[in-house]
Amino acid sequence: MLAPGLLDTGLGEALDEKIREEKAQRSMLGIGSVDDIAATAVFLAGSDADYINAVLIRVDGGLVY
């Protein structure tokens, strides 16, 4: 299962800018994109991930709560 962090999809434009800035600062890599999630899903669907089983993968750029 993938657990994405804050993503820049356009849906969060109503999110207060101060909240976006704070969350971006808490993440080592800033706000993610849909491509970040897609790349992880493609990896998991490939043969390189054959031995991965029943795990929650946080795709959040190192977000610190």
Image: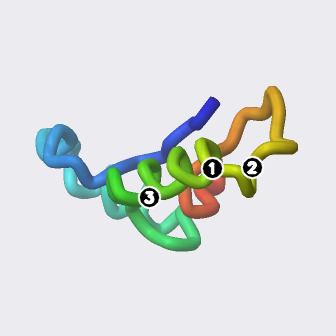
The answer to whether residue 10 is left or right of residue 21 is left
Comparing marks 1 and 3, which lies closer to the viewer? 1
The answer to whether residue 16 is left or right of residue 39 is left
- Quadrant that contains the N terminus: top right
Q: Which residue is mark 1?
A: 46
Residue 10, given in percent of the width and then of the height, sits at: 14, 47
In what element is the residue under mark 3?
Answer: helix
Q: Looking at the picture, which amino acid does disc 1 mark?
A: Gly
Marking on residue 49 = 2
Q: Residue at x 21, y 55 (%)?
A: 17
Callout count: 3
Q: CA distance from mark 1 to mark 2?
A: 6 Å
Observer-nearest of 55 and 48 = 48
Q: Residue at x 27, y 54 (%)?
A: 8
Q: Residue furthest front?
A: 47
Badge 3 vs badge 2, beta-carbon distance below 8 Å: no
Q: CA distance from mark 3 to mark 2?
A: 17 Å
Q: Residue at x 74, y 57 (%)?
A: 48
Q: Which residue is mark 3?
A: 36
**Marked residue nearer the N-terminal end (1 or 3):** 3
Q: Looking at the picture, which amino acid does disc 3 mark?
A: Asp
In what element is the residue under mark 2?
Answer: helix
Residue 7, given in percent of the width and then of the height, sits at: 35, 50
In what element is the residue under mark 1?
Answer: loop
Badge 1 vs badge 2, beta-carbon distance below 8 Å: yes
Q: Residue furthest bottom?
A: 29
